[in-house]
Image: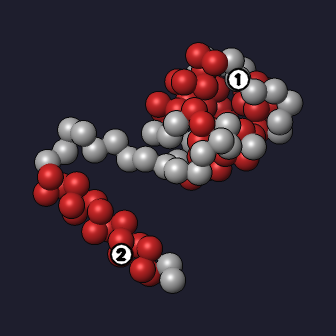
Amino acid sequence: MFKDRFKELRTAYKYTQNEIADFFNVAVNTVYSWENGMFIPEKTKLVKMADFFNVSVDYLLGMDNKRYIEVSDLTPEQVAHIQQIINDLREAGK
């Protein structure tokens, strides 16, 4: 499950494997190995990835399907605006 979630997030954020390798200070073939299920990153990298992609480690590992958006530094009005955009996107997808 990790390989699918990781690749999904990388492509959704439009990062190349090279960019991810640079950010996480690993070789490109390591990123390739993650995406092809050859191995899962060590715990410290998983935590860094979760923070980078704004998801939980449980989400990365396929143990949880919930995604979160960090809004703690926004005003209540900004949070309401974001929630309205989310609601509009859900409605448009029906």
Tell me what residue is drawn at x 68 percent, y 43 percent. 62
The residue lying furthest to the right in this view is 38
Tell me what residue is drawn at x 70 percent, y 23 percent. 41
Residue tagged by mark 2?
Answer: 88
Where residue 94 appears, x then y in whole percent?
51, 83
Tell me what residue is drawn at x 38 percent, y 47 percent. 69
Q: Earlier in the sequence, mark 1 or mark 2?
A: 1
Q: Residues within 10 Å of mark 1 (few under 14, many from 20)?
A: some
Image position of 16 with respect to 12: above or below: above
**As drawn, is 74 to the left or to the right of 44?**
left
**As drawn, is 29 to the left or to the right of 15?**
right
Residue 8 vs residue 32, the one in the foreground: 8
Kindly state the secondary structure of the residue where label 2 is placed: helix
Kindly state the secondary structure of the residue where label 1 is placed: loop
The residue lying furthest to the front in this view is 63
Q: Quadrant of residue 77?
A: bottom left
**As drawn, is 40 to the left or to the right of 16?**
right
